[in-house]
Amino acid sequence: MTVIKINAITVPEGSGDELARRFAARAGAVDDQDGFEGFELLAPTDGRNVWLVVTRWRDEAAFEAWSTSPAFGHGHRSQQERSGGEAPPPVSTQSELWSYRPAGGSGDAAGAADS
């Protein structure tokens, strides 16, 4: 059954563009992972300071395999670090991982709850 992992990242005012830039710099890094189904970075439009990183996985085992793999650590390093430089300062003040499963909706998502 598809699982959805949401990383809710608190981003101080003025740091959102940098967060988006960092995600763009590593776009596609997870695409080839077994069980990976999709990714979205959601920017708030209502004055909140929490950005959402939404990923979909075939199942919990696929997510766990990725999150404990060397590819996870490599993908979460900055371009500077991958080139041997120092890590840039963080652009977030905290994050929280949420886990969901489809439970209804339209299109394919509604049928996924029955799987």
Image (cartoon, rainbow, N blue to C red):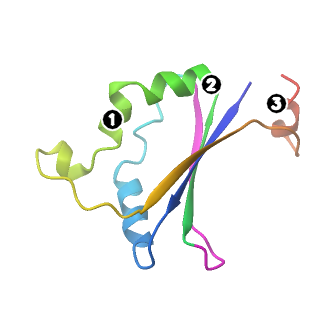
Q: Quadrant of residue 3?
A: top right
Residue 46 is labelled as none
Q: Mark 3 sits on what residue?
A: 112
Q: CA distance from mark 3 to mark 1?
A: 30 Å
In the rendered view, would you say 66 is above or below 108?
A: above
Camera-side mark, 2 or 3: 2
Mark 1 lies on a secondary structure that is helix
> Where in the figure is residue 73, as x and y percent of width and height?
33, 35
Q: Earlier in the sequence, mark 3 or mark 1?
A: 1
In the picture provided, is 4 more to the left or to the right than 87?
Answer: right
The answer to which of 60 and 110 lies nearer the viewer is 60
Q: Is residue 108 magenta?
A: no
Residue at the location (56% across, 65% down)?
50
x%, y% of residue 11? Answer: 46, 67
In the displayed structure image, the side of residue 27 where residue 38 appears, left or right: right
Q: Are marks 2 and 1 in contact (CB under 8 Å)?
A: no
Residue linked to disc 2: 60
Query: Does the magenta portion include 44?
Result: yes
Q: Earlier in the sequence, mark 2 or mark 1?
A: 2
Which quadrant: the N terminus?
Answer: top right
Q: Estimate how packed mark 2 is, as few (under 14), some (14 to 19) or many (20 or more) residues with alpha carbons within 10 Å.
A: some
Question: Whole-percent x and y of residue 80?
Answer: 18, 52
Measure the C-alpha gap from mark 2 to mark 1.
19 Å
Q: Which residue corresponds to mark 1?
A: 73
* Badge nearest the viewer, 3 or 1: 1
Left or right: 25, with 16 as reference point = left
Residue at 60 percent of width and 74 percent of height = 48
Quadrant of residue 24 within the rendered picture: bottom left
Determine the secondary structure under disc 2. helix
Tell me where the magenta segment starts and ends, as one range: 35-48
